[in-house]
């Protein structure tokens, strides 16, 4: 992967230093050339310059403090288009020494290693267990309230991955088109700083010619494969829209690539916010299933900082943790070691609610679990258009789909809350997801939330808080016993949170107790199973946190 670098010989720079105010710009100009770095033979560091500092200041300060350095060649490349972030490369190994030296320079505010990234995927055996993950998160019950919206502007999930098959039969309608850009004319028509980003953006080719890759195609399908269209599968969001950002070949990805991709998304949402939607894109979340194992927050401050910057603009980052059986609180992980309030880190579970083999965990670092074993989705590069994948990569898009779907619930008070402030909306959506998990024993001491994603619980809270009209009202419409061991009740309620049903005897003793969450509909039904009861009078009690209603009944034999 060729990259543009400006290169300086330490010896040459020393000779020119006395003329630095007049000649430095000339040296920087004539030294620009194409350079192909080798990770094995070079050391690479990312730096953010302090306000007002220039790259020439860094070079001068580095030379002054390292006159005896054995690192003979210093190359640089600007990574941030809208921020003073640069990649610095030296010949030979020794990035730790380089990092320490750069951090001492007055021109440098932040610095980190530019290490290799890996896609968060694991080899899998194809298993046709048709989308058990959607049933596991109770998506069908939540779809009673929303299956997404096709209106403009629809909330977008940006996917940062190696590549995608955007022409897949079940994904074509899900790909966001930047209609302010004219495709293939080599002009930045919308003046957003990127040329020909009509179907998304490829960081390597600097246009929308996306690489095709199975990993990104699977992720896209889990989030937003077209639902209810008679073909293939359904995504979490039947009508979801995806902004695709392709990084290039998966075995060549580095932190610099990730930073540039995150900045691209940040800039699109920032433009959208600043222009009231006239330019940019309404991105509400980023899904990325790549990272770096055993890394601490101190090692990648730039990545953590831009996750915060994204959150300030209203964008949540939803990221997978490592495919390793490790506690990342102890071992570290990129990006899950970041302490951002705008980050949701996800691990993978199987159908029994257990964290899968070779999936990381952490009581402080990992927020939530989602289905991640034998997940059926759209695919590329195989004989079939659909196959199954296993790993944290395929758990994360369930959460990303939930984030996107939350923004589509058409309740006036809920939408007003989301639009009041982008950063508070992002935190609100994260809280909705994390606080409405389904608790699981295996997760209680291994994840921050102690549970797995449950879309129905999330939507129940939204509807109970924002979507009911008037005061909460519980009313029993019909109460009968279809058989000696059952009681059936029809009722209405405007609260879609936890309800309970009980059988109590005349002395007040609770003989049967059951809790449940009503379906999202106008008239509800619930059947309570009864144990053998002696003859006598009993009370059936139906209630929630605000109201309780009862009906008496008699057992005659």
Image (cartoon, rainbow, N blue to C red):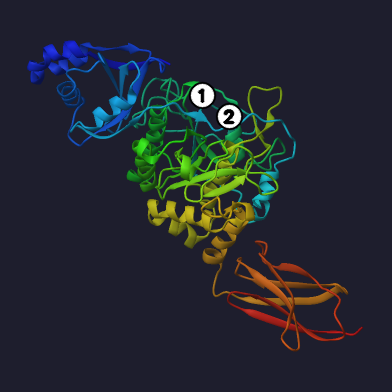
Q: Residues within 10 Å of mark 2 (few under 14, many from 20)?
A: many
N-term mark: 2 or 1: 2
Q: Is residue 509 left or right of residue 252?
A: right
User: Does residue 238 show up?
Assistant: no
Picture residue at 43% right of the left edge, 23% below the top? 207
Of the pair 266 and 449, the residue shown nearer to us: 449
Residue 368 image point, x, y percent: 55, 49
Of the pair 184 and 122, the residue shown nearer to us: 122
- Give the vertical position of 76 relative to 295 (above or below): above
Kindly state the secondary structure of the residue where label 1 is placed.
Answer: helix
Q: Is residue 399 left or right of residue 81?
A: right
Q: Is residue 147 left or right of residue 34?
A: right
State how far apart marks 2 and 1 are (Cα): 10 Å
Of the pair 227 and 284, the residue shown nearer to us: 284
Instruction: Find disc 1 in the rendering and name its residue.
Output: 250
Residue 257 image point, x, y percent: 41, 27
Instruction: Find disc 2 in the rendering and name its residue.
Output: 215
- For the C terminus, the quadrant is bottom right
Kindly state the secondary structure of the residue where label 2 is placed.
Answer: helix
Picture residue at 71% right of the left edge, 77% below the top? 476
Picture residue at 41% right of the left edge, 43% below the top? 338
Residue 435 image point, x, y percent: 53, 58
- Callouts 2 and 1 close, C-beta under 8 Å: yes
- For the N terminus, the quadrant is top left
- Give the vertical position of 240 relative to 514 (above or below): above
| Farthest right residue in view | 557
Of the pair 111 and 140, the residue shown nearer to us: 111
Residue 390 image point, x, y percent: 64, 35
């Amino acid at each position: 992967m060729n990259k543009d670098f400006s290169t300086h010989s330490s010896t040459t720079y020393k000779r020119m230093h006395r003329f630095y105010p007049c000649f430095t710009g000339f040296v920087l100009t004539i030294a620009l050339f194409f350079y192909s770095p080798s990770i094995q033979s070079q050391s690479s560091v990312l730096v953010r310059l302090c306000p007002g500092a220039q790259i020439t200041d860094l070079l001068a300060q580095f030379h002054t403090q390292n006159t005896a350095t054995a690192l003979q060649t210093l190359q640089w490349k600007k990574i941030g288009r809208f921020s003073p972030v640069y990649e610095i490369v030296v010949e030979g190994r020794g990035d730790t020494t380089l990092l320490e030296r750069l951090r001492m320079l007055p021109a440098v505010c932040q610095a980190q290693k530019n290490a290799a990234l890996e896609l968060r995927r694991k080899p899998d055996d194809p298993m046709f267990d048709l989308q058990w993950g959607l049933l596991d998160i109770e998506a069908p019950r939540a779809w009673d309230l929303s299956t997404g919206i096709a209106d403009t502007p629809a909330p977008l999930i940006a996917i940062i991955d190696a590549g995608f098959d955007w022409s897949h039969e079940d994904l074509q309608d899900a790909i966001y088109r930047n209609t302010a850009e004219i495709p293939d004319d080599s002009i930045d028509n919308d003046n957003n700083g990127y040329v020909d980003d009509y179907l998304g953006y490829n960081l390597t080719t600097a246009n929308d010619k996306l690489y095709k890759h199975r990993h990104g195609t699977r992720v896209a399908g889990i989030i937003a494969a077209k639902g209810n269209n008679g073909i293939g599968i359904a995504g979490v969001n039947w009508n979801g829209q995806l902004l695709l950002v392709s990084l290039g070949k998966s075995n060549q990805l580095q932190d610099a690539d990730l930073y540039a991709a995150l900045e691209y998304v940040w800039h699109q949402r920032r433009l959208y916010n600043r222009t009231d939607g006239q330019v940019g894109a309404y991105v509400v979340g980023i899904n990325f299933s790549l990272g770096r194992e055993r890394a601490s927050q101190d090692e990648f401050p730039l990545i953590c900082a831009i996750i915060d910057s994204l959150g300030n603009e209203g964008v949540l980052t939803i990221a997978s943790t490592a495919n390793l059986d490790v506690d990342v609180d102890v071992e570290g992980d990129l990006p899950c070691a970041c302490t951002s309030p705008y980050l949701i880190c996800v691990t993978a579970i199987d159908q029994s609610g257990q964290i899968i083999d070779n999936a990381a965990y952490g009581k402080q670092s990992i927020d939530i679990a989602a289905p991640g074993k034998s997940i059926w989705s759209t695919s590329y590069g195989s004989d079939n258009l659909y196959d199954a994948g296993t790993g944290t990569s395929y758990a994360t898009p369930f959460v990303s789909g939930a984030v996107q779907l939350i923004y589509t619930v058409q309740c006036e008070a809920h939408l007003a809350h989301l639009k009041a402030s982008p950063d508070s909306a992002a935190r609100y959506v994260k809280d909705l997801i994390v606080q409405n998990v389904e608790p699981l024993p295996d997760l209680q001491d291994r994840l921050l939330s102690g549970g797995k994603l449950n879309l129905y619980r999330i939507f129940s809270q939204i509807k109970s808080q924002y979507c009911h009209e008037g005061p909460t009202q519980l009313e029993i419409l019909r109460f009968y016993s279809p058989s000696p061991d059952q009681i059936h009740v029809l009722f209405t309620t405007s609260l879609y949170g936890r309800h309970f049903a009980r059988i109590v005897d005349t002395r007040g003793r609770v003989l049967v107790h059951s809790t449940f969450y009503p379906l999202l509909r106008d008239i509800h039904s619930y059947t309570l199973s009864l144990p053998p009861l002696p003859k006598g009078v009993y009370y059936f009690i139906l209630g929630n946190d605000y109201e309780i209603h009862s009906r008496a009944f008699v057992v005659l034999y």
